[in-house]
Image (spheres, helix red, strand yellow):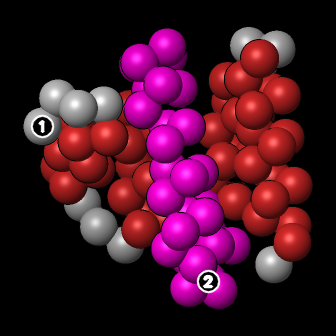
């Protein structure tokens, strides 16, 4: 479980270094671990990193990865990103 926090931190570092694929992978792993342990609070914190990463890269794979991690649809992820950014 504590690995989830580490993966999130690694994602932040990777994003700062503009290693966006690594950032996505680390954030996704963190989100999956928090979801596995039912930690919605920290999962939401990790989730807030994805919209910024998506805006920077326009990588549709980010939407797919988040949808898989949350067991939802890409359409719902887009709406969630909009809500997190205050656009929804």
- Left or right of residue 11: residue 87: left
Q: Which residues are magenta?
A: 31-58
Q: Which residue is mark 1?
A: 88
Q: Is residue 78 above or below residue 65?
A: above
Residue drawn at x 75%, y 32% is 12
Q: Which mark is residue 36?
A: 2
Residue 81 visible in rendering: no
Q: Residue 70 in the image: state x and y as whole percent.
A: 41, 68
- From what the image shows, is residue 81 above or below residue 5? above
In the rendered image, which quarter is residue 85 located in? top left
Decide if residue 37 is on the left or right side of residue 56.
right
Q: Is residue 35 magenta?
A: yes
Asked whether 41 falls inside the magenta stretch, the response is yes
Point out the tag, 2 or 1, that comes first from the N-terminus. 2
From what the image shows, is residue 58 above or below residue 23?
A: above
- Residue closest to the eye, 85 or 71: 85
Indicate left or right for 66 with 5 as reference.
left
Q: Residue 39 location in percent, x, y? A: 58, 78
């Amino acid at each position: 479980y504590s690995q989830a926090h580490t993966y999130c931190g690694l994602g932040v570092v990777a994003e700062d270094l503009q290693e966006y694929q690594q950032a996505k992978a680390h954030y996704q792993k963190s989100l999956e671990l928090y979801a596995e342990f039912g930690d919605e609070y920290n999962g939401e914190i990790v989730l807030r990193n994805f919209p910024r990463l998506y805006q920077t890269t326009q990588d549709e794979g980010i939407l797919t990865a988040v949808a898989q991690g949350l067991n939802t649809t890409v359409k719902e992820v887009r709406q969630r990103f909009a809500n997190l950014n205050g656009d929804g």
